[in-house]
Every structure is written in structure tokens, then in C-alpha cells.
Amino acid sequence: MKTLTIIKPDDWHLHLREGVVLKNIIHFTSDYFGRAIVMPNTKAPITSIDKAIAYKKFISEALPKSSKFEPLMTIYLTDETDKGELINGFKNNVFFAAKLYPANATTNSSLGVKKIENLYEIFELMQESGMPLLIHGEVTDSEVDIFDREEVFIDRELQPIIKSFPKLKIVLEHITTSYAVDFVQENNIGATITPHHLHINRNAMFFGGLNSDFYCLPVAKRENNRLALRKAATSGKECFFLGTDSAPHLRKWKAFCGCAGIFNAPVAIESYLTVFEEENALDNFEKFASLNGPHFYNLSPNKEKLKLVSRSNKVVEFINVLEEKDIVGQIKPFHAGEILKWQVEGIFN
Ligand SMILES: [Zn+2]
């Protein structure tokens, strides 16, 4: 039986949602990750210091007792974001970073930014103070094909941002294309890569009929892109790090309207590790999962260790969402029903 011990990882891109869903799913992340950047696209987005403090309190109260997990909060940028609020929140350690959603790019993003130039004064301040900018990199114009939206965003929006603010700390989130892989490396920015974009290409959404289980945004692309992402993630290069983009939706909504998002938190570490093993890159897994992110964000790596064991690991079909003791919904995890080859053994000092 093979084992692998790495520094405890962090998740640099995570959706925790709210209410009963948050209470039911947070332990999947907090059990094995030291920190996570929590996305601000709650139903009423996190656009102020007060909202971020209240959301963090709710998260902290939902954590298992004695948990050392640290949620890193973000502010949701809008056309009306107040400069003072943003910088005060960053300087007082309420906000770890700011998140840019082009309006309507994904779940709960209708209040996102309509014209990115409107934020240039804010980017100036962020650059001066060292506040990271996390970007959902897709244009949302209806005339741009959904499979081209990342590339068009890079050319039309990201290039000019980098040109105007060369010292701004930028992360292009959940990259999905070989074009993004090359761009990130050439432009000295960071990128997160999800487990699902390493496993599926766009065919998954159309296998056996329209299948919303594999619908997320940005959508999975052609196979050549998946292969480029696998090469990037397993390369050990400092610009690429772990960000699951785990995004739970109750089954009834996923089945009813096919909401975008894949819930991978229960199997994220094992899912990534499967890819690293297939690519003969187990030696680089710790860099991707536990070192490159802290390095990019100027943080220390976690102190504890995570031990993984190679043994057969059957993934459940559904996870029940409980309120008191009643089942109020179900969420389907990524890899549902599959047998993975690795399993988390536990956390050690
Ligand atoms: Zn996301």
C-alpha cells in the first residue's frame, strides 16, 4: 500500500454558500484544508465590511468544534464599490482579496461589473496596497461563443489591466484553456485549476443526454485544453495552484434548471491526486496543493501534515443535507459512484 504525506493543503477558490447548505458541507473542506478563499457571490453578495464580518461569523459558527480552519474573505466588486470600504477592509484584515465577476458570468453574479474600466481607480489603489485581484475571466456578451469567452476576456480585458497595472497581484481563477495556461506563465500572474477541469472535457455535458452534473462556468473545453491544464497543474510551476471552485447546488435546482457548479469538496484532494499519479507527477503534488498558493500570497505554508493512502475509495452517489435530523435536500458530489484509488488518512502534527 502506497502512502503520501504532504503539508496540509489550502483551497484558494471555494464556494461555501449560506444557511443549511453551508452548515452541512463546510466540514468537507475544513477537515483537510488549512485555509480557503471564500467566494463572495452569496445571494446578497458580500459587498461591504459589515457583510464580510457577518458571513465570516456564520462560517466560524458552522465549523466543527476545535477546527483551526481559516476562511479568507473576499469583497465582491461592483460598478459602485466604495474605494474607502475596499481599502479599509483590506488594511483591517477583513478582506483578503477582491473578486471581479463580469456581470452575469456565473451563479449570483447579476450585480457584477458591467464596465471594467470603471474599476481602474480601484485597481490603482489595490496595486499600491498589495491587495490581490481574483478574476472570473470570461466575457459575457451573447455574441461571443461560450467556449471562447475565456480567450476573448484575456485579450479584451485582462491584457489591458496588466498593461495599466503591472504590479497588481492578479489570479486568473479556474482556468480552462491552453491559451490561459500560456498567458499566465508569460505574464507573471497566478492561476487556480479545479479538479473537474483536469478530469472532464466538454463531451461530459452531453454524455447520455444533456447532463448538468458536469456543467460549470467556465464550461469545460476541448480535450487539448484539458491536457494542457493537466500538464500545467502537475508541472510544479509556482504560478499554478489548487483552487477547487467547489460549488454545491441542491439536486432539485441542479436537475430543474441545470445551475452551473460542481461540488467536489468531498473528493477534491483524491481527485487531484489521481491526476498527479496518472501524469507520473506525485512529487509535484505538494507544490500545487500546499506550497505554490502560500508563496504567491506571501503566507507561510501550513504546519500540519496530510497523509494519503492508496486504497480503493468508493464515492457516494449523494450527500444528504440535514436540518435538525430531517433530510431537506441532496447534493451530488463530483465522481459520484466512482471508485477512486486514493483516500485521505488524516491530519498529523
Ligand atoms: Zn467560483
Image (cartoon, grey):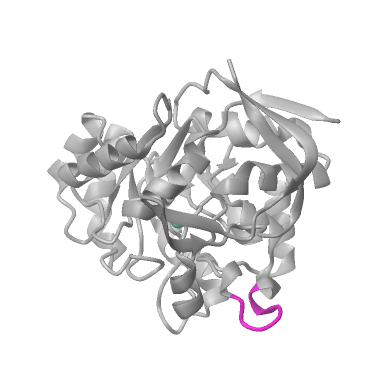
Q: Is residue 67 left or right of residue 78?
A: right
Residue 209 lies in the magenta stretch:
yes
Residue 54 drawn at (x, y percent): 21, 42
Q: Is residue 262 left or right of residue 316?
A: left
Q: Measured along the vertical axis of the image, is residue 56 above or below residue 108?
A: above
Residue lying at the far top in this picture: please name it.
349
Looking at the rendered image, the quarter that the C terminus falls into is top right
Q: Is residue 201 left or right of residue 113?
A: right
Q: Is residue 75 left or right of residue 251?
A: left
Tell me the residue at 57%/32% (across/down).
9
- Residue 336, quarter of the rendered image: bottom right
- Residue 135, quarter of the rendered image: bottom left
Residue 200 shows in the view: yes
Tell me the residue at 41%/41% (across/down).
37
- Residue 92, quarter of the rendered image: top left
Tell me the residue at 57%/42% (across/down).
242
Residue 143 drawn at (x, y percent): 45, 84
Tell me the residue at 52%/80% (across/down).
145
Q: Measured along the vertical axis of the image, is residue 51 above or below residue 180?
A: above
Residue 166 shows in the view: no
Which range of residues does the magenta coloring cover?
205-211
Q: Main SS type for the magenta part?
A: loop
Tell which of 250 and 238 is nearer to you.
250
Residue lying at the far right in this picture: please name it.
1
Residue 118 drawn at (x, y percent): 23, 60
